[in-house]
Amino acid sequence: MRLSLLLLLSLLFPNLVHAQIIGELVDVSEDFQKLEQTYFVGSRLVDFDAATGEGTLQWDRYARQPSLSFNKLDLGLSRAQSNEFPGTEYDRDPTLPFSIDFVSPRTVRLRFNTRHVPIDAMRNEPSLMLDGPVPADDSWQVEETEEAVIYTSAHGQVHVRKDPWQLAFYTADGTLVTRTQTLGDPGSFTPYVPFSFIRRARDLARSTAATFELSYDEHLYGAGESFTRLDKRGQKMIMYLRDAMGAQNYRQYKAIPFFLSSNGYGMFAHTSTPVTFDFGYEFDAHTTIYTGDELMDLFIFLGEPKDVLSEYTALTGRSPVPPLWSFGLWMSRITYQSEEEVRTVAQQLRDYEIPTDVIHIDTGWFETDWRNDYLFSASRFDDPAKMMQDLRAMGYHISLWQLPYFTSKNRMWDEIVEGGFHVRNESGVLPYEDAILDFSNPGAVAWYKSKLKGLLDLGVSVIKADFAEDAPLYGLYHSGRTGWYEHNLYPVRYQDAVYDITKEVTGGGILWGRSAWAGSQRYPLHWGGDAENTDAAMAASLRAGLSFGLSGFTYWSHDIGGFVQRAPRDLYRRWTPFGALTAHTRTHGAPPREPWEYDEELVVDFRNAMEMKYRLIPYIYAQSVQASAEGHPVMRTLFFEYPDDPTSWLIEDEYLLGSDLLVAPLFKETTSRNVYLPPGQWIDYQTHRVYDGAQWHEIEAGDIPIIALVRSGAVLPHAALAQNTAEIDWSNLELHVFSTNNTPSVGLVALPDGEAHAIQLDANDQLASDPLQGQVNWQVVRVATE
């Protein structure tokens, strides 16, 4: 009965059934299937100045027309007449502004306006998604014929066909990588969505659909931190932030409107409205980028994955290198409740000789758990400043949890509401159920920073910037916009405030964030949210981290063992070295997390994994410095380093930590697994066995329950074991040479706060040159291979 009623309501009142409940995902592609919308399909260039790249494009009017055949209804697009009155005031087929701009020899910007307004007037303030003004590149050469305009650079070509209109992108040697698709591209009975926009019946605003051709064998990656399959081909990705509530579903804490293709390009939808990527989901031969924006603003990047990410992050910003101490272990649980508990755990970590740099205090440092009022509980924390001073002397930094939502029971409520620092509901006055800080309000930002400054002055080193995925869609913001434009942008504003005040007070730019949108990579670092305590969630977390890295983020972490419940012992044991071989390492979740709360054997396993991490910090840090400089991820897919190896594009349960260390975690209770190795020779980091690449091997893990292999010919800098990063002796480092023959070996080295330098050893393991000019006493250790 209820289903029948819903069906009837959906037919009579389609917008009623699709009304949003708070927190529901917004899939803008659904609007393109509705009968009541007016559709406009890109048709022909009416005029175009090839020198400036500016012109006008005619959009032909269409409507969804039900068609009955063989006991089914299809809703194809058919040419439509004007339906406005008076008809003299509206065009059936409007002619609207279009521009093409060249940002670099690899980057092209396309802008299509769906309103009769100049394109530049559509953006009246600097974009928070971009890292400054968009540059202009004059290296592109232009050639015009009667049929087309052809632009050529050192790295690609853009062909602008005039009538019928089409944009096509080619490599420098003339190989097609993708092109726009309209009706009839290709001929099909499937009613796919062409390159178009709609006038929405509910509010007369516009939404856009940019449709491009997919090759039959093309792979697609990125779109933020996504827990689904790594290759997004065949998926529909909804770029609308939502507390994902775990790692085993399709929702995203961090949605980024960017992707890259195995065909040699990437795309960025420059908007903060909801975005949907249809990666061959509705029609296998098309990628369609749906946005809720009235300006279609797309950046296209040409090249291999490394080129594409460098271009994208040059535009939107790159991740600065976080402080050295952040690369050590973060010990945490939900939650330490008192000063006594924190001091006890700190001492136990030193007693058990588990290298550690950070202790995180989650929701339990307030007088009332979760009630964020920026004050340590007076009943459970006797002297927070003295506690942090003492812990710093032991080599620890303190991380504190907080969030930007305040209930009416919070003493901050009145201050926020009276100051007008909250997001307003539809009344224009009242807050939502919670007072949600409005970071588009400079007054709210100043108020918020003052609260964090008090904590940082007290001795806190880093703020956990939790939540921020669910800013109200229908909220009214100080910016003058609703959540349609501010919802996805909320974490960028939030994290900018946290990062800025932290760097100002402590000198170290860092936060620990869960949510993200394009531009958030400028405020490292982020972690993977509340993963379940399962093998599947462990594997999904790796996929999410790899996707996130392919979306412009250099740094990412995850909760070792999963978050939701007590971690099963075997899972915790296997997840620990996976966490250790990540740029940033944190154990967090339902207690216990301290290995001595399990048994002595787990203490040994846990300590061994962390000792491995701390010895490798010179390698991890150097790789991080280089990755930050280039806009690349530290934890990366195999194809990122081996784009010419077809199998590497298919691997989603292994990764490279930096350029030279391949890691294959154990995702089930086992001591071995099948591992694919890219071309070349590989040396097991633990056992020193040699394996040939470009093939699969069944490999047994070493004493530490993980498989890690080093590229033959690589030099990995190591340090002597220290109990925290401040104790690492950077004046005496070891260069571990992994090589199967007497040929030169290469690696990267960097000192704290310094640049990364290439280092090369000749066939006799002698330094070809010293890039650090005597600052380090190098000891060369050649790994004996088996």
Image: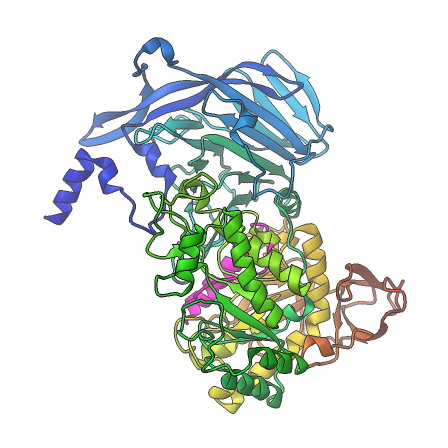
Residue at 49% x, 39% y is: 216
Instruction: Check the image and tell me how it is coloured.
Output: rainbow
Q: Nearer the viewer, residue 203 or 256?
A: 203
Task: Tell me residue 380's x, y (percent).
Answer: 46, 82
**Image quadrant in which you'd find residue 417:** bottom left
Residue 279 appearing in the image: no
Q: Nearer the viewer, residue 369 or 209?
A: 369
Q: Residue furthest top?
A: 88
Residue at 52% x, 50% y is: 443
In the image, is residue 447 above or below residue 5?
below
* Residue 551 falls inside the magenta stretch: yes
Q: Nearer the viewer, residue 299 or 437?
A: 437
Range drawn in magenta: 523-552
Task: Tell me residue 616's x, y (percent).
Answer: 69, 72
Q: Residue furthest left?
A: 1
In the image, is residue 510 above or below residue 632?
below
Residue at 50% x, 28% y is: 180
In the image, is residue 178 above or below residue 304?
above
* Residue 454 falls inside the magenta stretch: no
In the image, is residue 29 above or below residue 568?
above
Side of 489 relative to 721 (left or right): left
Task: Give the tally of numbered discs.
Answer: 0
| Quadrant placement of the C terminus | bottom right
Residue at 30% x, 29% y is: 201
Q: Residue furthest front?
A: 418
Side of 274 relative to 662 (left or right): left
Task: Tell me residue 80's x, y (percent).
Answer: 32, 17
Task: Tell me residue 714's x, y (percent).
Answer: 75, 64
Q: Nearer the viewer, residue 93 or 734?
A: 93
Side of 167 relative to 335 (left or right): right
